Amino acid sequence: MIGLTTAGGKMAWLLGPFLASVARHFPGVEWRPFEMPEREQDFSGRLLRIMAELEEDVFLWSCVDIFADAVVPLAMLESLDRFMAARGNVVRMGLAEEPWPCAPEEVWEGLPVVRCADLKACSIHAATAIDVSLFDRRNLARVLRPGWSIWDCEIKGTDEMLRKRPQGLESFAVRPGLFRKAELHRRDGFWWHLQMLDAEDRAAVVAARPQIGWQS
């Protein structure tokens, strides 16, 4: 299975710790980082070109500031890949534990698959949330448009998918999730959530981090 991610600007220093982390937590996944475009609005166009070059229909995506706290066996990812292939219309399969309201869909090869139960509370998880997820490249390409930033892919992609509902596309998630995620993010001039990482990830981040402010 192929994993995609990108890093640039203020996030570029996280690529090394991220790749070390996913090598441990997602064994068997081949990660292919690509360079973040200089213009934010060129993100979707670059992603569309990269997806068109993939041989696999389903790929794993994660942002470099998201870290998992458990090992995810490749067999689980391959099982969910089969679910997406069997349905044919799935855009995204969320993998992490999430608090949003869900409704059972089915149990697939022992994995409970759910859908968003309230679009007012979890609309992007019913569509194109860009976090740690499996994506079907062909179905995602039907939703994305050139000229979108990574955030537009979530917001405008969700609008495109839910309001216009092209070809009945759907998104699901595993519940409970396969891991808990810790997201390092920058707010109010500081970076947050270092203490949420496991010891090995925390050490890698501390070794790589620039001289920036941190909050717990």
Image: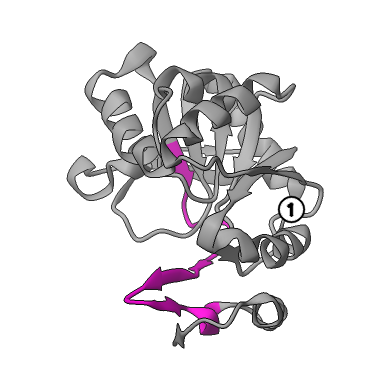
Is residue 105 shown to the viewer in this render?
no
Image-quadrant location for residue 14: bottom right
Q: Residue furthest left?
A: 120
**Residue 102 in picture, x, y percent from top left:** 32, 48
Q: Residue at x 35, y 61 (%)?
A: 99
- Residue at the limit of the structure toward the top, as seen here: 167
Which colour scheme appears in the figure? one colour
How far from the left and from the top, in percent, is residue 122? 28, 47
- Identified by mark 1, the residue type is Pro
Q: Is residue 181 magenta?
A: yes
In the picture, residue 116 is in which quadrant?
A: top left
Q: Nearer the viewer, residue 34 or 68?
A: 34
The residue located at (46%, 40%) in the rendering is 39
Residue at left offset 44%, top offset 17%: 142
Indicate the quadrant containing the N terminus: top left, top right, bottom left or bottom right.
Answer: top right
Residue at the far bottom in the pictured view: 216
Local secondary structure at mark 1: loop
Please identify the quadrant where the C terminus is shown.
Answer: bottom left
Query: For this view, does 175 lie left or right of residue 52?
Result: left
Count neighbours of disc 1 (C-alpha within 10 A) and say few if under 14, some if 14 to 19, many if 20 or more. some
Point out the stretch of residues depicted in magenta. 172-196
Left or right side of 119 for 16:
right
Image coordinates for residue 185, horizontal then vertical, percent: 44, 68
Question: Which residue is drawn at the image coordinates 61% and 70% (left, top)?
Answer: 69
Nearer to us in this view, 70 or 182: 182
Q: Which residue in the rendered view is the most extreme toward the right?
A: 28
x and y, in percent, of residue 109 in the image: 63, 39
Q: Give the residue pinned by disc 1.
A: 73
The answer to whether residue 198 is above or below residue 156 is below
Res 71 seen here: yes
